[in-house]
Each structure stands twice: as structure tokens, then as C-alpha cells.
Amino acid sequence: MASAFDRDDGASACRRAWRDVSIGDDDVIPAVPRILLLDTDVAYGTKLAAYLEANGCKVQSVQEGHAFNQSLASFAPDLVLINQSLQETTGTDVLRSLRRTVEIPCIMLTELPDLTDRVVNLEIGADDDLDKSVNPRELLARIRTVLRRSYTPSSALMPQRMGARRPAAWRLSVERRELLRPSGTPCKLTSAEFETLKLLYEEAGRPVSRSTLCERVFGRPFRPGDRAIDTVVKKLREKLEPGQDSRSIKTVRPIGYVFTGFPSDLDAPDDARDQRTVPYQVPAD
């Protein structure tokens, strides 16, 4: 029997750039979404990973719970896909454990659809629950929808705290090339400042080297003593947090810089912030 991947006769049409699927200009999703798949079916995982990566995602596939938990920290996914049928446990149990600690977009995949399982999964926090035989183009569209609905940088690995209010958020629009403050007013950035922020934002929680920033922002190799990127980062820090020591962009010696979240993300209530789980612990400047 042909798999969903074999039946996808429109795959070539779907292999456009990630941004070409129609979404509003104000929607903010990762430029290269990082997807973590938990499924004991290695063949299915390999095919799905290949399909998603051909369509603009970065995918890591694991087969058991311990590797899944490790990848949550090391891979820092933007969304997780969990198969309901696992060897040592169920997808529902994995999801329930996940929701006790972190808030991250999650889509469940079910081989033998059962209404009870689906209802339970949605009630305990799944963002969607699909038949595992779903056409990969539809799955890709569902992933985009979930990310568009729920994604903000640095929020994916934040513990859920019922009743904790988050401040209004900054918004970075890649399509419009603008940064909006929580008030909705633009934060004016130069081209170099915008490109630097975009690169750091896309790798939120992961250090980005000066070499990478220099090549991507200025189109030239980084050389010892080159302070151009340092100057851009200094100006960015002043615009994001005027008159304060920067919390949003941290120096990671001797590598480069890491983006830890916009000021509004970092101003979460104390009970949420104190238990935050982050993929990278930034050493003090």
C-alpha cells in the first residue's frame, strides 16, 4: 500500500521557500522551524524528516523517551510531533509529562484513531491531533498553523504557570522588516541592526559566533580585531533596553552572542521566571 508520502503528487509545488505559504505579514514564526519527532517507527520518521526538511524545516527524530527529553534541551525545538503508539509508554503519557514542565507547540500523530485518545490529548494540551496517515502536505500546513498561533521566541521552553500574566510582547516581522515595541510603535533599526537581530532571534537560546554574524550581515569574513558586529550589537542593546544592562542579548565569550528573549519575555512574573527552562545557560558577562 502506498504511504502518504507516495500519494503526495503535489510535493514539488510545496517545495517553495517556507515563507511562500500564505500567512499574514504580521505573523511571526521561526524562519527555519526546528521540529522534534518522537516515533518508534524509524522508516516513517526518516521519510517524514526528509519531507519536512525539503520544505524548510530542521528535524530531529528520536525513538524513545529519554532521547526525547535530552533533545528538548539540546535541540531546542519550536514544535514537537509525538506518536500516540510507543513501545514503553503512550504519547498521552509523554504529553502529560511535557505539559507539567514546558509550554511548547505539540501535534499528536495517531495510527489507529480513537476518539477518546484524541479528546484526552487535546484536553491535556495538544495543539492538534492527526491520523498518522495524514497527507504530508496537510501535516506541513498544520505545523505552520500551530506555529503561527503559538510561537514567540524564547517562550517555547517556558514552564506553564496558570494565572501568570505575561506583558505585551515585542513583534519582529521579517516580511515587513520591522520591530514593533509592546506599545505597537516601531523601533527603528538600521539594515545591519535588523539582520543581526533576525539572526540572533532565529537562534534564540543558542550562541551565534561573530564569524557567522559578520558573514551573514556584512557579507565578508570575520577578522581578528574586527569590531563591526560588536558595535551593531551595542546599538541594538541600547534600543531594546535603553539605559539598562542588556538581558536580551548576552555575550558568550569567546564565541559571540546569544539572544535570550525580548524584554517583555524576560519580565514574566517571578514564579514563572525562577523556574524557567532554557536550552543554554549563559555565563555572566
Image: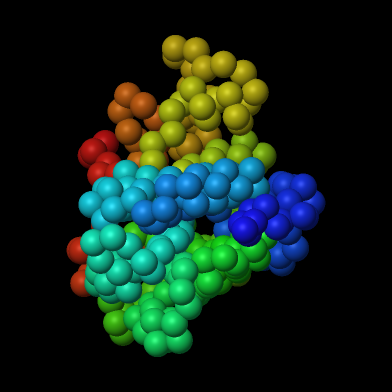
User: Which residue does the image show at 46% across and 37% down from the upper left?
Assistant: 234
Residue placed most toward the observer, 272 or 127: 127
Residue placed most toward the observer, 54 or 219: 54
Coordinates of residue 271 in the picture (x, y in percent)? 21, 72
Question: For the view shown, which residue lies furthest in the front direction?
Answer: 1
User: Which residue does the image show at 67% across and 60% down from the upper left?
Assistant: 137
User: According to the image, what is the colour scheme of the structure?
Assistant: rainbow
Name the image quarter holding residue 159.
bottom left
Q: Quadrant of the N terminus?
A: bottom right
Residue placed most toward the observer, 255 or 62: 62
Question: For the view shown, which residue lies furthest in the top direction?
Answer: 224
Give left or right: position of 37 versus 89: right
> Total marks drawn?
0
Q: Is residue 158 visible?
A: no
Coordinates of residue 78 in the picture (x, y in percent)? 46, 56
Residue placed most toward the observer, 266 or 281: 281
User: Which residue does the image show at 50% across and 12% down from the upper left?
Assistant: 223
Q: Is residue 262 above or below residue 99?
A: above
Q: Is residue 149 visible?
A: yes
User: Which residue does the image show at 32% across and 44% down from the upper left?
Assistant: 74
